[in-house]
Amino acid sequence: MIPGRTALLPAVLALACGSDGGSDTDAATEGGSGTADPMTSASATVGTTAPTSATTATSSDSDSQGTSGDPSDTDPTTLDSSGGSSEESSGGIPTEPFSFFVTSLRAMQELSGSDDGFGGDLSFGEVGPGAGLRGADAICAAIAEQSMPGAAAKQWRAFLSVSADENGNQVNAIDRVGEGPWYDRLGRVVAMSKADLANERPQNGDAAIVDDLPNEDGVPNHQPDPNQPEVDNHDTLTGSNEQGMLADADATCSDWTSSVGDQDVRPRIGHSWPRGPDNGRNWISDHDAGGCAPGVNINGGGGPQPGDYSVGAGGGYGGIYCFALYP
């Protein structure tokens, strides 16, 4: 655990998992029984040193999600008299559209406290069954909060499949991200529905981003620094097949709790941007990474190199896709 993580984790985990610290999955889509109220505030930030104090999430006076835990039960967005969006008074959830991003290398390095990132272990301080998913969700929430204060309350879900959650059930990435629509940090449509997501590239989204899915700042991930050349960072962890369902039991780095480099355990990845015009285009599932060890390789190389058993071996750094249950 990096210095200051103890101050950061309670707020982030509460925002990611709900005010009771319960299930990491959306009750409506995965059969969970817990409910989570929208949070009024958060002070989680991305960095190796957390603030001196962290404001933990608090429940609103009225549960704007009803009793099912399904954010579709209530529209979290209200319009003011001018037709613009305003914050829902009872929920405290920002109504500015922001519900999708690819985690940037910078953010993954800062949260992990390592230049090599997390590797395949995304538990982020969580322990026990289901730790990988809960930790990954908290990573998404922390990065979203850094980009847009208050955004952690939108309930972020990492687009990851596992063979067993805390209840021993298989979880498919496509079933844990809500129903859409989803927007990037600049308010551009990424996709309108789960049917749009289950394609080689997301459908019915903004043409400017479909072939270069943006990071938490709305910047195309192929060139995160506009003052520098493009980098080879397209490999993104999913553990999923082309339909967003679990690829196989060996495709998830022990359900995102292992960072051991092993040639026999290779996580499945998709491409945040296509490798070529006619190949390597699937954003969910294209090939297996070199292994589960932490590692960054963004200088090109044409696929995992022999002897490199890291998540970044083929052109990446172990980034993940993050989706929010609220637009």
Image (cartoon, rainbow, N blue to C red):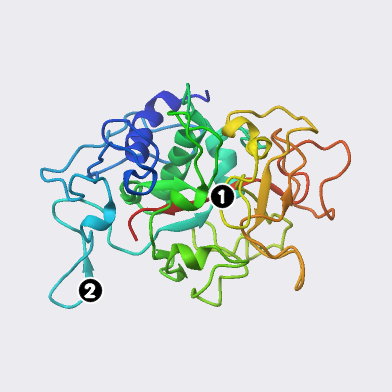
Seen in the image, is 228 located left or right of residue 78?
right
**What amino acid is labelled 1 in the image?**
Met
| Image quadrant occupied by the C terminus | bottom left
Q: Observer-nearest residue: 93 or 25?
A: 25
Q: Nearer the viewer, residue 106 or 69?
A: 69
- Asked if marks 1 and 2 touch (Cβ < 8 Å), the reply is no
Q: Nearer the viewer, residue 321 or 45?
A: 321
Image point 77% across, 67% down: which residue? 279
Which of the 4 quarters of the picture holds residue 188? bottom left
Q: Is residue 165 left or right of residue 314?
A: left
Q: Is residue 85 visible?
A: yes
Percent x, y of residue 1: 52, 23
Amino acid tagged 2:
Gly
* Residue 183 circle label: none
Q: Report whether residue 216 is seen.
A: no
Q: Nearer the viewer, residue 6 or 209?
A: 209
For disc 1, the neighbor class at 10 Å (few under 14, some 14 to 19, many from 20) is: many
Give the image location of residue 11, x and y in percent. Answer: 33, 34
Residue ID for mark 1: 245
Label 1 or label 2, whichever lies nearer to me, is 1
Depicted 100 relative to depicted 158: above or below? below
User: Which label number is shown at residue 84?
Assistant: 2
> How far apart are the alpha carbons under marks 1 and 2?
37 Å
Mark sitting earlier along the chain (1/2) = 2
* Percent position of residue 81, x then y: 12, 75
